[in-house]
Amino acid sequence: MFNSIKPVYLLVLLSASLLFVTSCSTSVRFANSAVVPSAVGTAKLTKDSNKNLLLILNVRNLVDPSRLTPSKKVYLVWMQTKDQGNKNLGRLVSSEAYFSTERNAKFSAVLTAVPTKIFITAEDSADVQNPGSVTVLITESF
């Protein structure tokens, strides 16, 4: 059957399916950090199998929060929305990879609103209601 399909049609079909898959998600990078200059990461918005809005973060080179000045206890992930302001999405835990001193962190959450920005703060407690003054990473607008 595929022998009868002309290469041009196959190319168009492949391009259309690739466009459909990539249009279902948005990925942005975190801006360089003054607090942890070596930290780099991405935030990706996509839909899960139930069509929920899913946020996936990947961060590399994030030092333990106890090594910051001043020392902190946890990293928290926040989303900023147009209507709801800032919302604490949860704790970001970084750990060293096997056979490496690089600290990596992955985070995912199902969102109830579309964010305008995602940011990570260093805090003394995980149950704070508002972000503190130590913003470690922040994305550009989605």
Image (cartoon, rainbow, N blue to C red):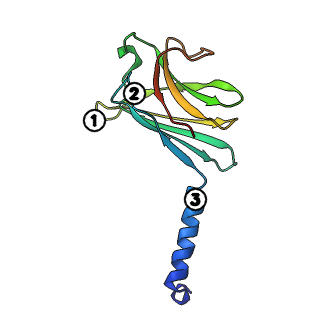
* Residue 18 relative to residue 37: left or right: right
Query: Badge 1 is on which residue?
Result: 99
Percent x, y of residue 25: 58, 50
Q: Amino acid at mark 1?
A: Phe
Q: CA distance from mark 1 to mark 2?
A: 26 Å
Marks 1 & 3, CB-CB < 8 Å contact:
no
Q: Amino acid at mark 2?
A: Ser
Residue at 50% over, 42% down:
28
Q: CA distance from mark 1 to mark 3?
A: 35 Å
Quadrant of the frame with the N terminus = bottom right
Q: Amino acid at mark 3?
A: Val
Q: Which label number is shown at residue 33?
A: 2
- The answer to which quarter of the image holds residue 66 is top left
**Which secondary structure, mark 3?**
helix
| First in residue order: circle 2 vs circle 3 | 3
Percent x, y of residue 95: 39, 28
Q: Nearer the viewer, mark 1 or mark 3?
A: 3
